[in-house]
Image (cartoon, grey):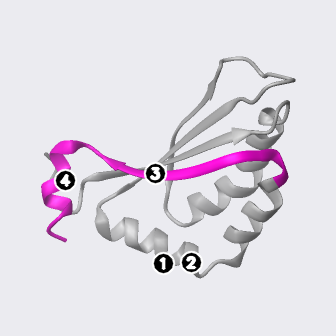
């Protein structure tokens, strides 16, 4: 269990790419979205692809993991994102490369109690 305010909160971006476009999508994500995310205080933790080869006629799935420390940092990132029109602009421009996307927020189960008392 982490000290209150020091819990790691993870952002998981799960992107299903249009067939043959996963590598292009990841490049665009890393060149356009990643600098914005880092500027808002997120730390890049992992970038994963499944299956582990670039498919030409089927969809790859991308998993990009970010983190922040503590609930206050999570709220700060959320507030900055909502005030930044480039966030929505990025997703609008990326949409033709994407079949589906979702974002999950995760924490270690031992940190949930302290995150509930913010």
Give the CA distance from mark 3 to mark 4: 15 Å
Q: Looking at the rendering, which quadrant does residue 113 occupy?
A: bottom left
Which numbered disc, 1 or 3, marks the residue that appears first in the sequence? 1
**Left or right of 38 in this view: 108:** left
**Which labelled disc corresponds to residue 59?**
none
Q: Is residue 114 magenta?
A: yes
Give the CA distance from mark 4 to mark 2: 25 Å
SS for callout 4? helix
Q: Name the residue that disc number 3 marks.
A: 104
SS for callout 1? helix
Which numbered disc, 3 or 4, marks the residue that appears first in the sequence? 3
Q: Residues within 10 Å of mark 4 (few under 14, many from 20)?
A: some
Give the CA distance from mark 3 to mark 2: 17 Å
Q: Please state the extent of the stretch shown in magenta in the rendering.
A: 96-118
Which numbered disc, 1 or 4, marks the residue that appears first in the sequence? 1
Q: Residue furthest bottom?
A: 83
Q: Name the residue that disc number 2 marks.
A: 82
Q: In what quadrant of the picture does the N terminus appear?
A: top left
Which numbered disc, 4 or 2, marks the residue that appears first in the sequence? 2
Q: Residues within 10 Å of mark 1 (few under 14, many from 20)?
A: few
Q: Please name which of the two marks, 1 or 4, marks the residue nearer to the observer.
A: 4
Query: Of residues 94 and 71, which is closer to you in this image?
Result: 94
Please state the horizontal and vertical placement of residue 107, each as a whole percent of the image: 30, 48
Q: Name the residue that disc number 1 marks.
A: 79
Query: Of residues 2 and 23, which is closer to you in this image?
Result: 23
């Amino acid at each position: 269990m982490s000290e209150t305010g020091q819990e790691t909160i993870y952002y998981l971006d799960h992107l299903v790419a249009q067939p043959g476009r996963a590598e292009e999508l990841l490049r665009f994500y890393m060149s356009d979205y990643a600098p914005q995310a880092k500027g808002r205080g997120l730390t890049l933790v992992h970038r994963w692809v499944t299956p582990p080869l670039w498919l030409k006629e089927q969809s790859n799935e991308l998993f990009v993991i970010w983190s922040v420390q503590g609930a206050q940092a999570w709220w700060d990132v959320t507030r900055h994102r909502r005030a930044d029109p480039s966030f929505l602009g990025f997703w609008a421009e990326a949409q033709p490369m994407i079949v589906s996307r979702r974002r999950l927020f995760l924490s270690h189960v031992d940190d949930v109690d302290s995150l509930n008392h913010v």
